[in-house]
Each structure stands twice: as C-alpha cells, then as structure tokens.
Amino acid sequence: METLVSLCAARGFIYPASEIYGGIAGFWDYGPLGVELKNNLKAFWWRRMVREREDVVGVDTAIISHPRTWEASGHVENFSDPMVDCRVCKRRFRSDQLEGERCPEAPKKRAVTDCDLTEAREFNLMLRTELGASVAESTTAYLRPETCQPIFSGFKRVRESARQKVPFGIAQIGKAFRNEITPRNFTFRSREFEQAEMEFFCHPSEREKWFEFWRAFRLQFHRDLGFDESLLRTRPHAPDELAHYANAADDIEFLFPFGWQEIEGIHDRGDWDLSRHSEYSGKELAVTNEQTKERFTPMCIETSVGIDRTTLALLVAAYTQQEMEDGEERTVMRFHPALAPIKAAVLPLSKKLAEPAKALNARLCGHFNTFYDEAGNIGRRYRRQDEVGTPFCVTYDFDSEDDGCVTVRERDTMNQERVPMEGITHYLRDRLEEAL
Ligand code: GAP
C-alpha cells in the first residue's frame, strides 16, 4: 500500500486534501489522472446500469434533504457506532474493535487495569450542518450518509414522470458523507466519498428473484472492470451484521493488500424506506397493478457500490512491477484500456518533429484523453506512460513525413506496429472498444 500511496501522490492520482495544511483525516483530492480514472469508472457504471437498461432511470438529487428524511429513514436513531474515549491519550475508538478493555494506543507493557476507557456511547455518524442566516432561526440538517434516500422520497415523481412501472429501478451517482471515527487504509474509509446506487422496486413475490439477479449482475460488472476472479468474492451478512433497513445483504468483496474488504453491498431493503417515508410525509407511495388492481408497496433491492473503494481496487489490481530483458524494472499500471486515464500519448521522436506531432495530438484529443510529451529520451517517455497506465504510445518519427505512418506501442506487450496516420483515430477507438 505504501508504494501505491506514494505513486498516487507523485503522479497526481490521489493525494491528501488540504495537503499544505497537513491534510484533514478522511478527505482526499483526486488529481488530473485520478479524476479521469474515476470519471471513466462512473461512466461505465452509468452505461451498464442506466443506458443499457430500459428498466432503470437515472437522477441527480440534492445532497441535503429535508431533516425529516433522516428520521423516516431511521438514520437519526440507528446510524451510529458504539464509541469509547480513552481518558489517558484522549483518543476515541470503536468499542467493537477493541481487544478487551485495553486502549489500542497504550504501550504493550501497560496493564489492562491501568487503561482508563469510558463506557461505550452511541455516536451518530451523520455530518451535521446548519441552514439559515441566524443562529436563533437555524435548522439542523445532515449531509447525506447514503445517496439513496432522495430516490425513495422522490419515488412517485420519478415513476410517474418517467412512465415506469414496477419492476423498475432508479439510479444515482453522488457524494455521501460519514463522520467515520477511524478513517483509514488510504481512501478505503473516508468521511467524504462517492456512491453509485440503484434502487430496484419490485412486487413482494419477486424479491428473491431480483436479489439473485442483481447480485450476479453486479459481480459480472466487477469482472468486466478487469478484476481477476481470485480478487473477488461475495459474502452474505450474518443476521447481527445487517443494517437497520436490510432484511438480507450480500457484500461483494475485493482482496486488498489489507485483506478482504467490502466494495459493494447488495441489499434487500424490503418496503422499509417507502413505508417509512409514506408514514412520515403522509403521502401515499403504494402502487396499483393495472391488470389485477392489486395495491401494494413495492419491495426494494439495492445495489450500492463505493466509487472511491472501487477506484482504489482498480489501482491495487493494476499495479505491477516487471523485470525486463535488459534487467531493468518497469512499473506498469495495467488498467483496463477503457478505464485508463490517458488513452494515448503522442510523442515526437525528436523536438524537431514537435509541430506535426502537436497537430496529430490536436486531432486525437477531441476523441480521447491524450497527452503530448516531448521531454526526455523515448525510452523514459514510454516508462512514464507505463507508470500511469496509458495503453498506447503513438510516436511520430522521421519516416512519418514520407510514409504517413506512426508507430503505435502497446503498454502490456510493448509490441510496436506501424499504423497509417489517416486511420489512427479509428484504429485506437477499435482497440479501446474491443475491451469493454
Ligand atoms: N445505501 C446503502 C449503503 O450506503 P453501505 O454498505 O453502508 O450501504 C455502500 O455502503 C458502499 O459505500 C460500500 O460498499 C462502500 O463501497 C461505500 N462506502 C461506505 N462507507 C464508506 C466510507 N466511509 N468510505 C468510502 N466508501 C464507503
């Protein structure tokens, strides 16, 4: 992890937020390469979950909801971790993660009886803010701890305006916030993060069927990202692990350097959310089957994936050190070509060829994210692109003027091929699309 964290900062994938002030725990910034990688992941999710499906529509809702939302959803009452404070070091810990009564910061030789921990208290994880101009009139509001609640409160509006009938789903990608007590493992547990969630509404008789369907569908999604089978598994939740809204849940887990960890949850939320919002708002959210005239509150199967966790998994899976024939080592980020932040680097063999190479780059950059680089010898420039996972390097050399061709060098195999410049956009597009 340490090597990866350094590479991410050095190459501008991800680095601590507010870095010049010493950082702020649980917050991260994505640099020029990180934002491209994350955007490509989000675009792929949107394509699979919304564009390619007639039964799912997308929304983009406000981060702050009416405060009643979080009473209805159960988060005000239930979204908490049991915490203890250490009176010696003044730090706070999750009591369910302690080994006995010992403070994790205490020196090993200190006796357990000398540790001074408070009783466990429930600590709500929602981040609060105040709305309104004056303190006297302000209202406490929460930054959403999950993106899906406005999907439930907007269920009727979306169903009617999009002319959807149950079974159908509503999807959204957006920021979520949790006041995690122990943010850790790089971006894995952050206080500000992105989720891509889809709430699928179905008849009560079909909930098991749809739970199985979405579990398999989502597992395939992770395989399509290029994750090897050995890095993925699913794990059902034991009854005492279930969130307050869930009747059943399966995690999709990824093998990080710090062990198997959840990257996505598939949840059977039953009719918890629609029923509660109906009760708290006084608005009817049940539907009628037009054929049978049966009136029912739909059941909800949720797929909820962390965009930051999946981005981290992509970085972990892509990172490779390879020894080459000449004995040198190269670092290669083997991103799936469709997810790679830069698709093609345009490199003039010599600075003398800058003008036509820049013209070629100008042609390509309207189609893909490209990068122009004329600094250093060609071998060094290839290595720099390997290290950020660019699948293709396009070199303009002294023959290009005469034969109208460029050399395309492939990242993983390092094979080189002469390709006519005229068809280079199609050539690259075909090779990128082959992949997804
Ligand atoms: N709406 C259901 C829900 O929020 P969750 O299992 O609490 O379920 C879903 O979260 C996903 O969101 C997780 O699988 C994870 O990928 C991501 N996630 C949750 N908390 C996170 C955190 N503190 N930092 C980064 N990602 C997080």
Image: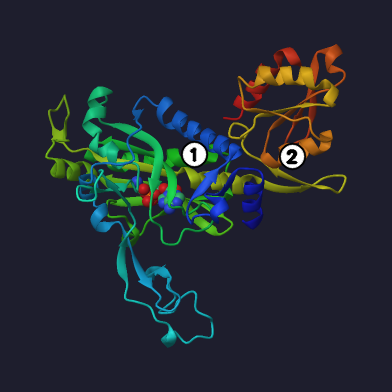
The label shown at residue 220 is: 1
What is the crowding at mark 2: few (fewer than 14 residues within 10 Å), some, or many (at least 20)? some
Amino acid identity at mark 2? Arg
Q: Name the residue under label 2.
A: 384
Residue found 43% across the figure and 38% down from its top: 217
| Quadrant, the N terminus | bottom right
Instruction: From the top left corner, tell me how far across and down residue 255 is, in percent.
Output: 55, 54
Instruction: From the top left corner, tell me how far across and down residue 103 is, in percent.
Output: 45, 76
Query: Which colour scheme appears in the figure?
Result: rainbow
| Quadrant, the C terminus | top right
Q: Specify the quadrant of the image occupied by residue 115.
A: bottom left
The answer to which of marks 1 and 2 sits earlier in the sequence is 1
Q: Is residue 268 above or below residue 103?
A: above
Amino acid identity at mark 1? Gln
Q: 161 left or right of 290?
A: right
Q: 234 left or right of 211?
A: right
Instruction: From the top left corner, tell me how far across and down residue 77 is, in percent.
Output: 23, 57
Q: 211 left or right of 19?
A: left
Q: Can residue 228 be seen in this view?
A: no
